[in-house]
Amino acid sequence: MQSTRIVAIGSAYAVVMMLVGTSIAVASHAIDSFSMSEAALVFFAFLLSWVLGSLVPGAPAGLGVRDGAMVWILTPYFAETAVVIAAVARLTTILGDAVAFLFGLLFFSHHKVRGS
């Protein structure tokens, strides 16, 4: 049962990361119009920078590491807007965290938590 729960949580997390990456690519496209292959580059730059930021100990939410990695990856392709795209990514994840927090508050305020 425990391994099934871990797989389900990991799968849900992967889906959420793909949705966040897609939303960042779409938001970035509004800033700097680019092709589908460039949108895919922004998507994968976000995912890679997220992993790098998660691997660095002591960096809360990959702060600085994730943003720097994304700028480093995107600068050769989007010289003028790489920093803006990284800022859009940071703001998108902050907004997503805030929405998830609010949903959690609503859920737990209406449902009894086991063990309490």
Image (spheres, rainbow, N blue to C red):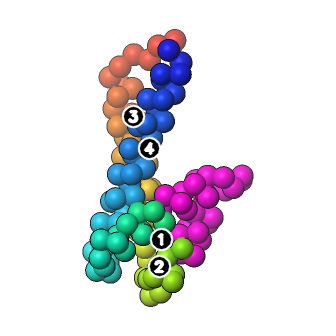
Q: Which residue is mark 2?
A: 82
Judged left or right of residue 46, residue 23 is: left
Real-space Cα separation, disc 2 to disc 1, in angstroms: 6 Å
* Residue depicted at 54% across the width and 60% down the height: 48
Q: Which residue is mark 1?
A: 86
Give the structural element (helix, strand or loop) at label 4. Answer: helix
Q: Which residues are magenta?
A: 46-72
* Residue depicted at 41% across the width and 37% down the height: 12
- Tell me which amino acid carries mark 3: Gly
The residue furthest top is 115
* Residue depicted at 48% across the width and 66% down the height: 45
Task: Determine whether label 2 and label 1 are within 8 Å by CB.
Answer: yes
Give the structural element (helix, strand or loop) at label 2. Answer: helix
First in sequence: mark 3 or mark 1? 1
First in sequence: mark 4 or mark 3? 4
Give the structural element (helix, strand or loop) at label 1. Answer: helix
Which circle marks residue 104 in the picture? 3
First in sequence: mark 4 or mark 1? 4
Residue density around tag 2, few if under 14, some if 14–19, many if 20 or more, within 10 Å: many
Task: Determine whether label 3 and label 1 are within 8 Å by CB.
Answer: no
- Tell me which amino acid carries mark 4: Ala
Q: Position of residue 39 (x, y in %)?
A: 35, 70
The residue furthest right is 57
Real-space Cα separation, disc 4 to disc 3, in angstroms: 19 Å
Real-space Cα separation, disc 4 to disc 1, in angstroms: 20 Å
State which quadrant residue 93 falls in: bottom left
Magenta-drawn stretch, dominant element (helix, strand or loop): helix
Q: Which residue is mark 4?
A: 14
- Between 73 and 103, the one lying in front of the other is 73
- Tell me which amino acid carries mark 2: Ala
- Tell me which amino acid carries mark 1: Ala
